[in-house]
Amino acid sequence: MGNSGVDESILHLTLRELCKQLKEGSLTPASVLYSYMEKALEVTKELNCITDYLSESQAQVKELGESGIRGMLYGIPISIKDNLFYKGHDSTCGLSRFINKPEEEDSIIVQVLKKQGAIPFVKTNVPQSLLSYECSNPIFGSTANPYNGNRTSGGSSGGEGALIAGGGSILGFGSDIGGSIRFPASFCGICGFKPTANRLSKKGIKASVAGQKTLEVMIGPMARDVDSLALCMKALLCEDMFRLDPTVPPIPFKDEIYSNTKMLRIGYFESDGYWIPNPSMRRAIRETKQLLEEAGHTVSLSVFQENCKDWVERKVIINDTEFLYFGQVYSDEYMNQWKKQDLDVLLCPSLGPAFKFGYAGKLIAAASGMSIFNLLNYPAGIVPVSKVSEQDEEELKHYTGYNNDFWDRTFKKAVMGGVGLPLAVQCVALPWQDELCLYFMREVERLVCAKKGI
């Protein structure tokens, strides 16, 4: 993408570097905000990822300078998903019935971000109703993938994925009820993190369908690297969060766990027993497994695969009450198997590469490997590790899935022609072990970067 007046030196800084320079005074919040504003405008002209400009951000810059307060995210421009409340602005969920119904107050997440000095400056696009992993709705249109304009950015936090991958935001927030942070992170080649439910406040987030309990929704950060996710979590898990929402357990970020260097006991699988990944995704898992083993970690094949098939098939044939009960039984069984194998973390496929437009709605079944961790309420994150190769594409010609049925054939068409598109893996930990999950993600990222010579 071209530029016109964008300060590229600012845009190339990591979040931690940017925070440091802002606090030292070598950069001003205004210069950073306007650089990202201009870059965001360039990106959305190409990808259609922004739905609303938060003009209050300019007044907030002035207030920051007058207050003298230096929070952990002082002067950092933040993008937020359409369904996070921002006072005076709509949260449409891509539905016309929510147009011209501005929110009366900020979400708790936005309030805490502001107290930490962050500056929300845009809201980003979503699918209609949020219940899709293709980012398109009749109000704002479709958001394209930054790697290929004929493919989706993912969903439902697809506007965030596209904007961050395009360089128009350094840190963003999405929500995840079945992979909605992780799909766009995987499709767009960035990092995304779904924390344990209720680790962060969910007050002030709009849903298209009220009362969802079986799959836990969660707000989480999205960024270009894992360390930015961890820094963001550390900033949010503060006294302001715990005071504003007393339902959030007052557990500060455990830096000693995230920063450790211990060897991990890692389980892995290439298929959840319900959906067989494409050749490129299987390669991504195998190469990541090898890197982890070479680094001294213990990696062993897990035995969770058969359970996912049981859960998904049961979901189709029972009523809501029975499903809630079966979900708890399944969660207990999964936990027991995890403990029996004495695992710290789990490495498993994400979904990718990015689908061509028009296919996500036909492939809900392919979401099984993501939505399962909403049912279980395990923290899970996405780390990009590779790109689709010519060899992957050749092997895809012979892909049949489990049954070579309509879903398998449709999936093959959705991902075909993806040479050069990002591939990511999914990293998972037990509930409330968010810092361990982030450490695992950072270790995968470190090993992949070392292999590439970065």
Image (tube, rainbow, N blue to C red):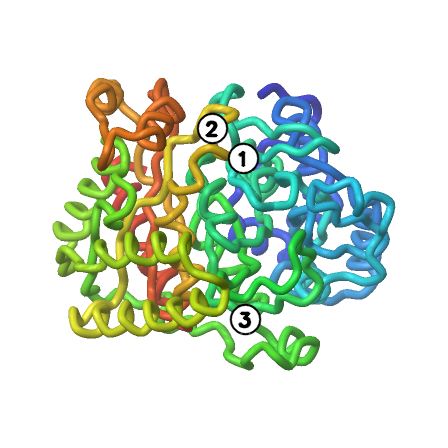
* Image-quadrant location for residue 6: top right
Rendered image: mark on residue 286? none
Q: Distance between the residues labelled 1 and 3?
A: 26 Å
Q: How many C-alpha atoms fall within 10 Å of the one at disc 2: few (<14), some, or many (≥20)?
A: some
Q: Can residue 417 be seen in this view?
A: yes
Which is nearer the N-term, disc 2 or disc 1? 1
N-terminal label among 3 and 2:
3
Q: Is residue 151 above or below residue 247?
A: above
Q: Nearer the viewer, mark 2 or mark 1?
A: 2
311 relative position to 304: left or right: right
Callout 2 amino acid: Tyr
Which quadrant would residue 31 be assigned to in this image? top right
Taking depth in this image into account, of 422 and 260 the one nearest to the observer is: 422
Q: Name the residue under label 3.
A: 198
Residue closest to the eye, 380 or 449:
380
Question: Label 1 neighbourhood size at 10 Å, few (<14), some (14-19), many (20+)?
Answer: many
- Residue 12 visible to the viewer: no
- Give me the disc on residue 359: 2
Residue 222 horizontal/vertical position (percent): 52, 49
User: Which residue is at 43% across, 36% downward?
Assistant: 363
Instruction: Compute the Cα span from label 2 to label 1.
Output: 8 Å
Tell whether label 1 touches label 2 (CB within 8 Å): yes
Q: Mark 1 points at which residue?
A: 134
